[in-house]
Image (cartoon, rainbow, N blue to C red):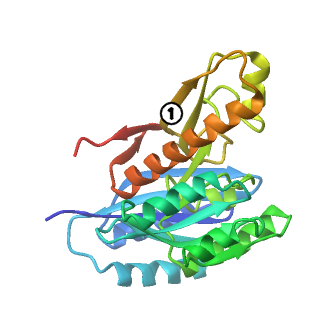
Amino acid sequence: MKKTVIGITVVGKDRGGIVATFTNFVFSQQGNIETVNQNVIKGLFGMYLEASFSKSIDVDIFDSKIQKLAKKEKMDVNTHHETNTQKNIAIFVTKEPHCLETILSASKKNSLKGNISVIIGTEKTLKPLAKKSKIPFVAIEEKNQEKAESKIIEICKKYNIDLIVLARYMRILTPNFVWRYPNRIINIHPSLLPAFAGAMAYAQAYERGTKIIGVTSHYVTENLDQGPIIFQDSFNVNPNDSLEQIKMKGQKLEATTLLKAAKMHLENKLEVRWRKVHVKSK
């Protein structure tokens, strides 16, 4: 019998005994701990557990029991398990349309093994694209990121989101959000990381006169632009190219590379081991 693997995220105020409480719960349900990662930043505790079950397990009953424990411990707990059904996708955007347009086009052609459930924007610029594709669009224009994320978390729960794609989303996600979706948030960065991290990557490359410029799709962690790299691609730069010409070339590559990473994730072809992304052979 194929084992069932359930991912468990625990986020809340740091205090002693939380790790033991949830690992013991898994053992009480006849599960084994495959992976456990934990972190604490400024009093915020985050943990990710992967629990495997060799015997048949009712996932709904497991979820119900762990939510009772979460309420008792005053922690926010989410569970996730892989299924063969279509995964629910949330796309986060700001105002640049190129990545969103490419993903929507792939979805329309049924080449995306997933359902785009919602598009979340920091403003309403791209709402017409969502409307044209008949996908719900929610604008979260709150400037305070923590307050904005509290609303985003509720939206992601409402749509039971499996994968988040940052399609040129120009906000930095906090650990409180990132820890809830380990290796399930994919970003595209306009440089060959680790070079030119942060903002204005094309401008940095242009000013340095680099001869090759690229893009990087990566999983998002609490450390900005340092998550496990999924795919990278590049293009040659002519010394006479203007910054705008470089941006135009880069944006085309951003869109295709982000789409490739999202497709591979949705097809369960990616695996993160020791901070490196491996493409499964089958």
Number of residues whose C-alpha sits closer than 10 Å to that of mark 1, classed few (under 14), some (14–19) or many (20 or more): many
237, above or below 149, in the image: above
Position in image of residue 127 (x %, y %): 69, 71
Residue that label 1 marks? 232
264, above or below 276, in the image: below
Q: Residue 279, can we see it?
A: yes
184 relative position to 31: left or right: right
76, above or below 20, in the image: below
Residue drawn at (21%, 74%) of the image:
56
149 relative position to 267: left or right: right
Position in image of residue 108 (x %, y %): 44, 67
- Quadrant into which the N terminus falls: bottom left
127, above or below 249, in the image: below
188 relative position to 53: left or right: right
Which element carries disc 1, helix, strand or loop?
strand
Position in image of residue 92 (x %, y %): 64, 62
View extreme (right): residue:
143
View extreme (left): residue:
1
Residue drawn at (61%, 54%) of the image:
167
Give, as a three-letter code, the residue at label 1. Gln
